[in-house]
Amino acid sequence: MDDTVLLGHGSGGTMMKRIIDEVFFEAYAGESLLRGNDAAVLAPASEAKPSAEALAYSGSLSFSTDSFVVDPHFFPGGDIGRLAVCGTVNDVATAGAEPRYLSCGFILEEGFSMDDLRRICTSMAEAAHEAGVEIVTGDTKVVNRGHGDGIYINTSGVGYGYAGIDLGGEKCAPGDKVLVTGTMGDHGITIMSCRESLSFAADIESDAAPLNHLIAEVIEAAPDVRCFRDPTRGGLASTLNELAAQSGTDMTIEEDAVPVKPAVLGACEMLGYDVFQVANEGKMVCVVPAGQAEAALAAMRANPYGKDAAIIGEVSAMQPERGPKVFLRTAFGSTRILDMLVGEQLPRIC
C-alpha cells in the first residue's frame, strides 16, 4: 500500500479499489458496504427494534447531512473522523429519531498520509460502534496537491423516528425550562489552543461525542420534551436565539447556572471570547415543560455524557413590539442581551 494518497486512488481503477479495500473496508465495513453496490438498501423500521426499550418507532425517517473541514485534523479528545460521525449522529437524533445508517464521502488531497487516513477511519469506526450506527455507503475523490488541505469528509445519516415524538424549536412555550447536557466551549477552545500552540495550566479537550443514546433516555423520562439542538458553530448564544426566533418567545439564562470548566473560562477571558458563543461538539440544548425538567435532568446526569448537565434558564412570553430576545442574568445581578455570534469567530472548527 502506498504511504500517501495519490491521484490514482481516485481514478476508479485498481488503486482506488486498493484504498477502499485496505483502508475503508478494513476499518468499518459491514455487510451492506461490503456488497460494493452504488447504493445501500436499508431495512424498514418495522423490522428493527429500538435501542430504548420504552420507545417504539413511528415509521417515519429523519435525514441529515454535514461536511467537516476542521483544522487541525487531530486534536485532544478527537479528530475529523470522530467529528464526522458524531456530528451527523447528533443531528439526526435531535429530530427525535434513532440514527441507524451513515454515508461517508471523502475528498482527499494528493500527498495526504495513508497512516493518518487509517487513523481517521479507525476513529470513525469506533464512534459508529459507540453510537450503534452502520456506515453503509460512501465515495472517494482525490484532488491535486495544494487544492484540498489534506482531507474533507461529508457524512449523511438516516434514522427511524420515535412514535408520538414531534420535536422542533417552534414548540418552545412560556414556562418551559432550558437545559444543557454539560460544560460549554470545550471544543472551540481546544481547536484554538491546538491551532495557536497555546498551553493552559489544565488540560482542555474536545467534547466530541455521540449523544443519540442520551437523547433517547431524556425522551423516555420527559416524553413532552419540546426540542433538542446542538450548540455547535455560534455556541449556546446562537442556538438559544434560533430557538427564541422559531418559537416567538423570550429566554432568560442564569449565567451562574451554565456549566463551564474553569480552564475554558480562563482561556476565553485571555483570548477575548464570549464562552456562550464558542462551539461545542458533544453537548445538547434541551427545552422541556417545567414539570418534566427534573426528570430530564436526572436522565441526562445518569448518562456519562451528561454528568455536568444543568437547568440554566426559562422560556417566557415575548413582547410583541420588540420581537424575541435572549437575556443573560449575570453573576452580578444585572441583565444583558445575549446576542447571536456575528461574523466568524473561529473558522474551520468542525
Image (spheres, rainbow, N blue to C red):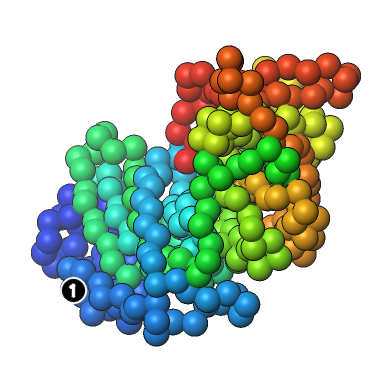
Q: Is residue 76 visible?
A: no
Frontmost residue, 175 versus 208:
175
Q: Quadrant of residue 159?
A: bottom left
Is label 1 in a helix, a strand or a loop? loop
Q: Is residue 34 visible?
A: yes
- For the N terminus, the quadrant is bottom left
| x then y, percent, for residue 125 | 46, 67
Q: Is residue 73 above or below residue 22?
A: above
Residue located 25% across and 75% down the image: 41
Q: Is residue 196 left or right of residue 19?
A: right
Residue at the far bottom in the pictured view: 47
Q: Is residue 9 above or below residue 148?
A: below
Residue located 24% across and 56% down the image: 140
Q: Quadrant of residue 101?
A: bottom left
Q: Is residue 350 left or right of residue 31?
A: right
How many numbered discs sit on the rendered protein?
1
Residue located 60% across and 42% down the image: 172
Residue at the far front in the pictured view: 320
Frontmost residue, 270 versus 253:
253
| x then y, percent, for residue 89 | 48, 58
Residue located 23% across and 79% down the image: 35
Label 1 sits on what residue type? Asn
Check disc 1 and report the residue beneath it: 37
| x then y, percent, for residue 16 | 19, 63
Q: Is residue 133 left or right of residue 204?
A: left
